Image (cartoon, rainbow, N blue to C red):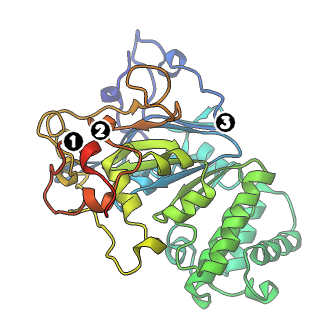
C-alpha cells in the first residue's frame, strides 16, 4: 500500500496521491471522514533544508465540530501557525513536504489542487493572520481589499460590496468607517489594522475561522469586543473556530476544548475546564503556572527553564524531557511517549477525568490535580521529583 515514503514532489509541492500500478487507491482504502467538520489525520509538515529536515508539524491528529471553538496554545515554534497554514493550503507550491490528511466538511485538502483550495478560502474557511501589516497589501486601500474578497464569493456590484465593507469595519469597532474605508493600511494604527484584518476574514461569513493571535496589539476593551464578535459568529452561524493564542485567559473564556502543542506535536488535549483543573503534562502545568493572578501579587512568576527544541534537531524520547522536572533517563529520554487517553473506564483511568482527556507523558499518573508549578519549576535542575504526588504540596 502507499506509505508516506511514496509521496513525491508534484505540481502542488510534495503531495502525490496517484497509486502505483497494481496498488489500491490510497484514499479509496482510507477511512472516510467522520462527522466532524474539520479533521486532521497524522498531518506532517516538514521543510527540507541544507542542514536537514525541519519537522515543524509532526503527526497531528484532531477534530473540530461546527459551533465549537478549539484553543491551541504553546510557545513560539511549537507548530501552531504552520498547522493553520497547512489547513488553509498556503504551503502548496512550496518546498514543504506534506503528508497525512486534512478533511474539511467531507473534502480532503492535502491532495486537492491549488485552484480548488483557493476557491474554499474566504467562504468555506478564512484566517486572521498574526501580522496584519505584512498580510495586507500596501498598494490598495483597506476597503478595496475587503471588497475584492467579498466580490470573489458573492456576485454583487461594487456599490453593494463597498457598503458591506463599511458595515464590517463598523462591526469590528473602527470609528468613522465610511471614511476610513478609503485609507491605506499604513494609515491605520496597529490595533486598527488588526481589526481591519478581522473584518476582511469575516466578510464572507466563513464556516471555519482560524484566528492566529487575533487580539494582538489590541487594548482590553477592543479585545473583549473582538472576542465577543467571534463568539457570536460561532453561536449564531454555527461556525467552527480554531483559536491560536498565547493568552490562556482568552482560552479559558472562549474555547470549548484546548490543545497544547510542543515540538511540533500535541502533548495534551482536553475540554477547557478539565485541562485547567487537572493538567496531566508537566509542560501544561508550567504554562498554567506562568499566568499572573491576584494571589501572585508581590511574588515572581514561575518560568519554564530552558528553550523549546529546534524542529531541526528534536531530542530523543520526550521532546519536553530536557526541560522537565519529572524527567528520568528511562523511559523519558529513551522512548517517545504516545498520546494516550487518561480518562474513562479503561486501564489507567483517573476518577473525575473526562474520557477525551489525552496526554503525551510517561509519568502523567504521578501528577495530582493541585500541582504547584511554583514548586515543580522552582529550580533550573531537571529530574527534581521522584514522587511528585507527595512532593507537590501547598506552600505554607
Mark 1 element type: loop
- Kindly indicate whether the residue at mark 2 contacts the one at mark 1 (C-beta within 8 angstroms): yes
Q: Nearer the viewer, residue 36 or 28?
A: 36
Question: Which residue is disc 1 drawn over?
Answer: 387
Residue 345, percent across and down? 49, 21
Comes first in the chain, label 1 or label 3? 3
Closest to the observer, 268 or 36: 268
Which of the numbered marks, if any, corresponds to residue 191? none
Q: Secondary structure at mark 3?
A: loop
Of the image marks 2 and 3, the number of the one nearer the N terminus: 3
Examine the image and state in which quarter residue 342 appears: top left
Q: Which residue is mark 2?
A: 366
Q: Position of residue 283 (x, y in %)?
A: 32, 52
Compute the Cα span from label 1 to label 3: 46 Å
State the SS at label 2.
helix
Is the Cβ of the residue at disc 2 closer than 8 Å to that at disc 3?
no
> Dot 3, how many residues are within 10 Å of its Cα: few (below 14), some (14-19), or many (20+)?
some
Q: Residues within 10 Å of mark 1 (few under 14, many from 20)?
A: few
Residue 82 seen in the figure: yes
Q: CA distance from mark 1 to mark 2?
A: 7 Å
Q: Is residue 139 visible?
A: no
User: Which residue does the numbered mark 3 point to in the structure image?
Assistant: 105
Q: Please state if 99 lies on the left or on the right of 315 as rendered.
A: right
In contact (CB < 8 Å): disc 1 and disc 3: no
Residue at x-position 47% and y-position 71%: 293
Where does residue 95 sit, x and y in percent of width and height? 35, 50
Quarter in which the N terminus is drawn: top left
Q: Quadrant of residue 192?
A: bottom right
Q: Residues within 10 Å of mark 2 (few under 14, many from 20)?
A: some
Precedes in sequence: disc 1 or disc 2: 2
Amino acid at each position: 500500500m502507499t506509505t508516506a515514503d511514496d509521496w513525491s514532489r508534484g505540481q502542488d509541492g510534495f503531495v502525490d496521491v496517484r497509486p502505483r500500478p497494481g496498488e489500491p487507491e490510497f484514499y479509496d482504502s482510507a477511512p472516510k471522514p467522520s462527522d466532524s467538520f474539520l479533521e486532521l489525520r497524522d498531518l506532517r509538515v516538514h521543510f527540507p533544508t541544507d542542514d536537514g529536515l525541519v519537522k515543524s508539524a509532526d503527526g497531528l491528529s484532531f477534530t473540530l465540530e461546527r459551533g465549537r471553538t478549539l484553543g491551541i496554545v504553546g510557545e513560539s515554534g511549537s507548530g501552531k501557525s504552520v498547522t493553520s497554514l497547512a489547513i488553509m493550503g498556503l504551503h502548496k507550491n512550496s518546498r514543504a513536504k506534506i503528508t497525512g490528511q486534512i478533511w474539511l466538511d467531507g473534502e480532503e485538502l492535502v491532495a486537492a489542487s491549488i485552484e480548488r483550495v483557493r476557491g474554499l478560502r474566504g467562504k468555506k474557511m478564512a484566517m486572521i493572520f498574526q501580522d496584519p501589516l505584512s498580510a495586507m497589501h500596501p498598494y490598495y486601500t483597506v476597503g478595496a481589499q475587503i471588497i475584492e474578497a467579498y466580490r470573489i464569493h458573492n456576485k454583487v456590484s461594487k456599490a453593494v460590496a463597498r457598503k458591506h465593507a463599511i458595515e464590517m469595519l463598523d462591526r469590528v469597532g473602527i470609528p468613522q468607517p465610511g471614511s476610513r474605508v478609503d485609507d491605506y493600511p499604513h494609515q491605520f494604527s496597529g490595533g486598527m489594522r488588526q481589526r481591519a484584518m478581522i473584518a476582511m476574514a469575516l466578510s464572507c461569513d466563513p464556516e471555519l475561522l482560524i484566528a492566529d493571535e487575533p487580539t494582538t496589539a489590541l487594548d482590553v476593551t477592543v479585545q473583549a469586543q473582538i472576542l465577543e464578535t467571534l463568539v457570536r459568529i460561532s453561536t449564531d452561524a454555527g461556525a467552527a473556530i480554531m483559536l491560536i493564542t498565547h493568552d490562556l485567559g482568552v482560552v479559558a473564556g472562549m474555547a470549548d476544548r484546548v490543545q497544547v502543542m510542543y515540538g511540533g506535536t500535541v502533548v495534551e488535549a482536553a475540554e477547557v475546564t478539565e485541562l485547567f483543573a487537572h493538567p496531566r503534562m508537566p509542560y501544561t502545568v508550567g504554562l498554567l503556572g506562568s499566568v499572573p493572578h491576584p494571589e501572585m501579587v508581590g511574588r515572581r512568576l514561575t518560568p519554564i527553564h530552558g528553550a523549546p527544541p529546534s524542529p531541526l534537531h528534536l531530542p530523543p524520547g520526550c521532546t519536553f524531557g530536557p526541560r522537565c522536572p519529572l524527567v528520568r533517563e528511562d523511559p523519558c529520554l529513551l522512548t517517545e511517549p504516545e498520546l494516550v487517553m487518561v480518562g474513562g473506564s479503561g486501564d489507567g483511568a483517573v476518577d473525575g477525568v473526562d474520557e477525551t482527556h489525552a496526554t503525551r507523558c510517561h509519568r502523567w499518573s504521578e501528577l495530582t490535580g493541585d500541582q504547584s508549578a511554583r514548586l515543580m519549576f522552582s529550580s533550573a535542575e531537571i529530574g527534581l521529583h521522584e514522587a511528585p504526588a507527595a512532593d507537590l504540596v501547598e506552600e505554607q
